[in-house]
């Protein structure tokens, strides 16, 4: 399959070569943010590719963002520190007013404003988003927000957060109604951000919102329609996460192949044994199959067709292909795979996330079972 966006990929490979495994390893140890890498991407214009030219971005299709993120992951790096800077602005672009677009998009494109926190998940609601309890109550020319969000990534490295909150009580008939989207200044009074240390370096946090005043002009789109407003963006995000998984899968297949050729045991390369070869070959096949599903989802999106189901399928298949490749790569490396210096154990931990976030595999299977195959709903 010919590579998409070859110039972008080439430029990304050059940029990523300046941020080798030793850079990511040191950050991982300290759970530190890759500020230098994010700055380099920002200055090169890679984080504003999806913003239209009239707002200072390069107005490229989603496939360009997918190519950028795939190359970061293929190089051994991780795009999670900044991927949301690319697409979180999508809700402003699609549903924001002309004034909001003018006020925020050029500054996001220039990298002056960081909009890379997406506040949806809450501990009690979990995957059942319609049960979130964070509320926004209208009071004159502002909303008063109270609640608690969990797993909100990059909040410490973002100026703004896209927040989903309840503006009307939950209606059993229409549970997704009554939710609204706001742009929240993370420096507002009443916001407390607490880092959550996880098995990977992901800058994720818990956010407490206590009487936070949000100007009414920061409501995005129509009050009560917030769930629908964020859905398109979530589907685009799933394709981009799938692209990151492809990059992970390719990293693992390439590293496993190199090691299997060079490591000699019993007087021959371990890769001469079919017991070592075949799993690597299978991992390659699975990653290539996933790549075609990502391409298919991207082509539907580019043509303006419905692409939600295909985005979910691509995300499921790519995240599982990456995880299989991760396991094969670790096994191929024997004990060396567990040593930090090879970057395999770090990437192994990082690749696992995408079967849980931003949507877990079971929820995708449930969508396929009920929406595609017409099986009875279980919830
Ligand atoms: C590192 C990290 C970063 C994250 N970043 C963000 C972020 O920036 N913004 C944000 O809003 N969220 C973020 N999340 C949250 C993430 O999207 C959720 O963790 C994920 O959607 C799963 O929700 P949950 O953790 O509440 O799991 P739960 O809903 O508690 O589910 C637990 C398990 O049960 C399964 N399950 C639940 N219900 C069913 C059912 N009916 N049928 C079958 N299986 C079911 C799920 O698939 C899952 O495997 C992040 C999470 C992590 C770990």
Image (cartoon, grey):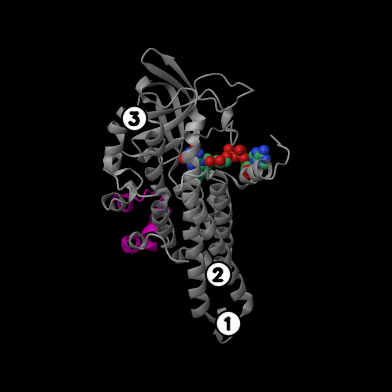
Tell me if mark 2 has few (under 14), some (14-19) or many (20+) residues whose alpha carbon lies within 10 angstroms of its own.
few
The label nearer to you, 1 versus 3, is 1
The x and y percentages for residue 37 are 32, 53
- Closer-to-camera residue (102/284): 102
The x and y percentages for residue 268 are 56, 85
Q: Earlier in the sequence, mark 2 or mark 1?
A: 1
Query: Magenta residues: mostly which secondary structure?
Result: helix
Start-end of magenta stretch: 10-39
Q: What is the CA distance from the residue labelled 1 to the residue labelled 3? A: 58 Å
Ligand 1 within 8 Å, label 2 CB: no
Q: Quadrant of residue 29?
A: bottom left
Instruction: Give the residue at mark 3.
Output: 187
Ligand 1 within 8 Å, label 3 CB: no
The label nearer to you, 2 versus 1, is 1
**77 drawn magenta:** no
- Closer-to-camera residue (198/236): 236
Q: Are marks 1 and 3 in contact (CB under 8 Å)?
A: no
Q: Earlier in the sequence, mark 1 or mark 3?
A: 3
Circle on res. 335 = 2
Tell me if mark 1 has few (under 14), some (14-19) or many (20+) residues whose alpha carbon lies within 10 angstroms of its own.
few
The x and y percentages for residue 305 are 50, 45
Circle on res. 240 = none
Residue sitting at 56 percent across and 71 percent down? 332
The x and y percentages for residue 359 are 56, 43
Q: Are marks 2 and 1 in contact (CB under 8 Å)?
A: no
- Closer-to-camera residue (241/119): 241
**12 drawn magenta:** yes
């Amino acid at each position: 399959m010919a590579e998409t966006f070859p110039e972008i990929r080439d430029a990304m490979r050059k940029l990523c070569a300046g941020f080798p495994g030793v850079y990511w390893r040191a950050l991982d140890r300290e759970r530190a943010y890759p500020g230098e890498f994010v700055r380099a991407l920002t200055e090169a214009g890679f984080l504003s590719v999806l913003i239209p030219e009239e707002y200072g971005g390069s107005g490229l299709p989603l496939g360009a963002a997918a190519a950028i993120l795939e190359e970061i992951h293929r190089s051994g790096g991780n795009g999670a520190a900044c991927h949301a800077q690319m697409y979180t602005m999508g809700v402003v672009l699609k549903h924001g007013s002309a004034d909001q677009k003018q006020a925020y998009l050029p500054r996001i494109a220039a990298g002056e404003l960081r909009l890379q926190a997406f506040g949806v998940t809450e501990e009690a609601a979990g995957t059942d988003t319609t049960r979130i309890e964070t509320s926004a109550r209208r009071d004159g020319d502002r909303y008063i927000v109270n609640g608690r969000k969990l797993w909100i990534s990059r909040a410490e490295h973002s100026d703004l957060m896209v927040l989903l909150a309840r503006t009307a009580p939950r209606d059993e008939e229409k549970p997704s109604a009554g939710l609204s989207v706001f742009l929240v200044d993370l420096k507002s009074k009443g916001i407390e951000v607490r880092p959550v240390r996880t098995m990977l370096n992901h800058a994720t946090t818990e956010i407490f919102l206590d009487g936070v005043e949000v100007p009414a002009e920061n409501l995005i789109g129509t009050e009560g329609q917030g769930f629908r407003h964020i859905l398109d963006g979530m589907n685009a995000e799933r394709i981009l996460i799938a692209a990151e998984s492809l990059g992970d899968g390719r990293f693992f297949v390439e590293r496993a192949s190199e090691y299997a050729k060079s490591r000699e045991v019993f007087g021959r390369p371990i890769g001469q044994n079919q017991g070592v070869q075949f799993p690597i070959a299978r991992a390659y096949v699975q990653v290539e199959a996933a790549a075609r599903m990502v391409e298919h989802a991207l082509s539907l999106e580019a043509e303006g067709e419905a692409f939600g189901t295909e985005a979910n399928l691509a995300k499921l298949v790519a995240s599982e292909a990456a995880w299989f490749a991760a396991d094969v790569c670790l096994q191929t490396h024997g004990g060396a795979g567990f040593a930090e210096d090879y970057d395999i154990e770090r990437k192994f931990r990082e690749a696992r996330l995408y079967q849980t976030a931003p949507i877990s595999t079971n929820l995708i299977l449930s969508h396929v079972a009920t929406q595609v195959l017409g099986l009875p709903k279980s919830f």
